[in-house]
Image: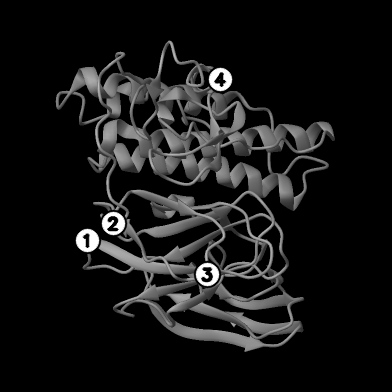
């Protein structure tokens, strides 16, 4: 594919002496992915190559480069889970590229295991509730799916906690008290919300960050932040307008240890989750991207004419954000239809809508 992607990789790593035991596995993962890029037969200029194929190749290369930058910049927090997520995104892009070349259906992407990304790609979706919390559908690895099934047996009660391995409790031992809902959590969830409950999401150590808000069922949701509006153009976000499952990303404010918000369900609503995530979770594109409701995207193309298609019933706005995800300027806005505008250049953009939309280069 391109010369020197994976070859000779280990000799160029300056951090090896910092903690060899913790970082050796990360080095091996990145090296293996670089070698996979090296030997992949696809070339952007080959006969039959499409823009979609080239976009998937670009995603894979971007993931490889991002993983190298994270390691070289000493950003291996939480045992390198961020690098593993980046590599997982790159591998999925290569799998999509292979499917496009072979004319097969695009592979479904299961996320990394909900309880611990080091478990690898999730194999099943199951119903799970944290202690004292609301049940929601999560994606877990095969081993954790089995352990959750075993939880129903009184002979071996267990407690799965996100970010940790399985914890077993002995008979006759009182479980540890659950954390009150008023204390900020790294992930919060709910269902059938009418705005009465105040949710508090713990902010991560890395900044800037986005809230990833997901609903696996049919939902129409409005989210309202409480407190400071700094970094946002509004407090209210319409996350979906057509009652379909969705995943939305929202800029999180800086300078706070926790952010408070309320969720308003419209009509039929299923369980939802909200999690703080790094910028690599934001969709990246060069030519086109689409979605439903409010979202944040990362445009990787050049300045020039663009097109916004919108099918919702209310106003749509495309806003440019700065590198800290703070509101900068409104690029275009309008009602349902086709809107032409000028891309200011590469960077982060926020779509604010209550319906289906698509962005593209003219």
Which residue is label 4 attached to? 142
Residue at point 40%, 18% (across, down)? 157
Q: Cα distance, mark 1 to mark 3?
A: 25 Å
Residue 24 occupies quadrant: top left
Q: Cα distance, mark 2 to mark 4?
A: 30 Å
Q: Cα distance, mark 3 to mark 2?
A: 24 Å
| Residue 1 appears in the rendering | no
Q: Cα distance, mark 1 to mark 4?
A: 34 Å
Viewer-proximal residue, 83 or 254? 254
Left or right side of 299 for 200: left
Depth check, mark 4 against mark 3: the one in front is 3
Tell me which label, 1 or 4, sits earlier in the chain.
4
Q: Is residue 47 above or below residue 189?
A: above
Q: Cα distance, mark 4 to mark 3?
A: 35 Å
Tell me which label, 1 or 2, sits earlier in the chain.
2
Tell me which label, 4 or 3, sits earlier in the chain.
4
SS label for mark 3: loop
Give yes or no for contact between labels 1 and 2 (Cβ–Cβ under 8 Å). yes
Depth check, mark 3 against mark 2: the one in front is 3
Residue at point 63%, 69% (across, down)? 293
Viewer-proximal residue, 291 or 238? 238
Instruction: Give residue 194's mark.
Output: 3
Which residue is label 1 attached to? 257
Which residue is label 2 attached to? 203
Tell me which label, 3 or 2, sits earlier in the chain.
3
Mark 3 neighbour class, 10 Å CA radius: few under 14, some 14 to 19, many 20 or more: few
The quadrant of the rendering that contains the N terminus is: top right
The quadrant of the rendering that contains the C terminus is: bottom right
- Determine the residue located farthest toward the left in the rendered image: 18
């Amino acid at each position: 594919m391109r010369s020197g992607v994976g070859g000779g990789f280990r000799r160029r790593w300056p951090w090896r002496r910092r903690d060899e035991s913790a970082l050796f596995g990360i080095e091996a993962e990145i090296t293996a992915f670089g070698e996979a890029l090296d030997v992949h037969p696809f070339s952007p200029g080959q006969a039959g190559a499409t823009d979609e194929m080239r976009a998937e190749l670009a995603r894979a290369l971007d993931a490889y480069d991002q993983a190298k930058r994270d390691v070289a910049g000493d950003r291996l927090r939480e045992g390198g889970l961020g690098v593993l997520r980046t590599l997982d995104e790159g591998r999925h892009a290569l799998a999509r590229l292979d499917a496009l070349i072979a004319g097969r259906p695009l592979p479904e992407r299961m996320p990394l295991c909900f309880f611990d990304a080091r478990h690898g790609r999730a194999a099943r979706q199951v119903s799970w509730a944290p202690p004292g919390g609301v049940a929601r559908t999560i994606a877990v690895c095969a081993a954790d799916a089995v352990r959750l099934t075993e939880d129903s047996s009184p002979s071996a009660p267990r407690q799965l906690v996100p970010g940790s391995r399985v914890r077993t409790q002995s008979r006759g031992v009182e479980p540890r008290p659950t954390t009150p809902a008023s204390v900020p959590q790294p992930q919060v969830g709910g269902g059938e919300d009418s705005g009465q409950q105040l949710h508090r999401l713990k902010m991560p150590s890395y900044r800037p960050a986005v809230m990833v808000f997901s609903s696996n069922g049919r939902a129409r949701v409005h989210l309202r932040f409480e407190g400071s509006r700094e970094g946002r153009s509004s407090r209210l976000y319409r996350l979906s307008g057509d009652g379909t499952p969705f995943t939305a990303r929202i800029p999180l404010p800086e300078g706070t240890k926790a952010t408070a918000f309320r969720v308003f369900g419209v009509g039929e609503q299923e369980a939802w989750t909200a999690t703080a995530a790094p910028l690599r979770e934001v969709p990246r594109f060069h030519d086109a991207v689409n979605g439903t409701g409010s979202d944040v995207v990362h445009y990787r193309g050049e300045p020039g004419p663009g097109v916004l298609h919108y099918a919702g019933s209310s106003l749509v706005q495309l806003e440019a954000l700065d590198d800290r995800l703070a509101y900068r300027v409104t690029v275009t806005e309008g009602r349902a239809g086709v809107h032409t505008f000028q891309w200011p250049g590469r960077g982060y953009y926020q779509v604010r809508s209550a319906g289906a939309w698509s962005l593209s280069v003219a």
